[in-house]
């Protein structure tokens, strides 16, 4: 099974993880709706929906760039309907768009919390809601959230409760919607990285160039997402998957190719449960003699 001719609607696909997933699908000849807010170049963020579209077309796919704020319910429905009309249906929804601010309750402006909640939890719910009728017509429909396992430990909340609530909200949609849609054969899963990923958020919000060097590239999530999408939807649903564990189960053994800097120890990401052990060493790669 591959993704040739399949149609994907990916939020936040103008850069980072969303774009990586899009490019992996494009190599098979997939159709991809790039649903994101960036239409004009940003001084601190690379790429727009139009530059992403050019890359997708160059990789072998078909692209539909759409300016979309997932907080706008009407715009969400219109964008998803336009995608299905343009490409003759919808097979995969990727809820990737997310807002982040790592601050405790005392130092979080409520407007910022509202933004995170509206994009992460509410935006995921809205996109999923408006995609359902289209997905039910697909022969292998998938919804994927870029969100963590529901590991309800105080340590995942204490330092950044507002962000954790908004991010875990996406995972709660997975928990409930997978049960709701299982009888219809629509798979709903979550995918989360073992380590930090080299994205604009990691560089600009979390840890700068140093953390980027201790990260994996978005390609690891793109490859894991591809494995999910090429699995029959009735065989894989309601799962909270960690990228390297899932790929290891599917036969991948070379994880060094995903490192930004092989000389650095990889930085663990938030929210990875303690009992889900890494399948490979996260320490620096030893130079060959």
Image (tube, helix red, strand yellow):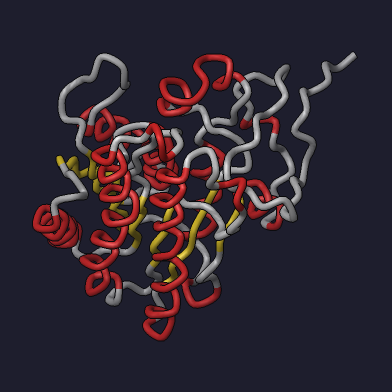
Counting from the top left corner in percent of width and height, residue 104 is at 45, 37
Q: Quadrant of residue 266?
A: top right
Q: Residue at x 29, y 64 (%)?
A: 128
Counting from the top left corner in percent of width and height, residue 232 is at 50, 71
Q: Residue at x 19, y 64 (%)?
A: 88
| Total marks in image | 0
Q: Is residue 48 left or right of residue 204?
A: left
Q: Residue at x 26, y 46 (%)?
A: 114
The outermost residue toward the bottom is 183
Q: Quadrant location of the C terminus?
A: top right
Residue 64 at least partly seen? yes
Residue 117 vertical position relative to residue 218 in the rendered view, above or below = below
Counting from the top left corner in percent of width and height, residue 216 is at 59, 31
Q: Quadrant of residue 60?
A: top left
Residue 112 vertical position relative to residue 205 in the rendered view, above or below = below
Residue 5 at least partly seen? no
Counting from the top left corner in percent of width and height, residue 211 is at 57, 21
Q: Is residue 2 left or right of residue 184?
A: right
Residue 191 vertical position relative to residue 208 in the rendered view, above or below = below
The outermost residue toward the front is 106
Residue 160 vertical position relative to residue 95 in the rendered view, above or below = above
Q: Is residue 207 left or right of residue 13?
A: right
In the depicted view, which residue is nearer to us: 204 or 78?
204
Q: Quadrant of residue 170?
A: bottom left
The outermost residue toward the right is 289
Q: Residue at x 45, y 33 (%)?
A: 102
């Amino acid at each position: 099974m591959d993704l040739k001719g399949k149609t994907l609607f990916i939020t936040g696909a103008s850069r980072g993880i969303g774009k990586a997933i899009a490019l992996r699908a494009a190599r098979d000849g997939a159709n991809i709706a790039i649903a994101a807010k960036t239409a004009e170049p940003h001084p601190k963020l690379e790429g727009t929906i139009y530059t992403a579209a050019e890359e997708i077309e160059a990789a072998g796919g078909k692209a539909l760039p759409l300016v979309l704020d997932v907080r706008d319910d009407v715009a969400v429905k219109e964008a998803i309907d336009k995608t299905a009309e343009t490409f003759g249906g919808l097979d995969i929804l990727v809820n990737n768009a997310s807002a982040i601010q790592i601050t405790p309750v005392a130092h979080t402006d409520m407007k910022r919390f509202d933004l995170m909640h509206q994009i992460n939890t509410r935006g995921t719910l809205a996109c999923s809601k408006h995609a359902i009728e289209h997905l039910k017509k697909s022969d292998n429909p998938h919804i994927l959230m870029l969100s963590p396992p529901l590991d309800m430990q105080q340590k995942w909340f204490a330092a950044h409760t507002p962000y954790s609530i908004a991010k875990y909200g996406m995972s709660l949609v997975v928990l409930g919607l997978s049960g709701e849609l299982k009888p219809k054969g629509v798979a709903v899963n979550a995918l989360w990285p073992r380590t930090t990923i080299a994205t604009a958020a990691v560089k600009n919000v979390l840890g700068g160039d140093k953390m980027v060097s201790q990260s994996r590239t978005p390609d690891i999530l793109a490859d894991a997402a591809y494995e999910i999408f090429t699995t029959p939807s009735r065989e894989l649903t309601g799962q909270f998957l960690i990228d390297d564990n899932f790929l290891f189960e599917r036969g991948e053994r070379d994880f060094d190719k995903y490192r930004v800097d092989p000389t650095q120890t990889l930085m663990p990401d938030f929210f990875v449960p303690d009992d889900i052990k890494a399948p490979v060493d996260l320490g620096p790669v030893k130079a060959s003699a």
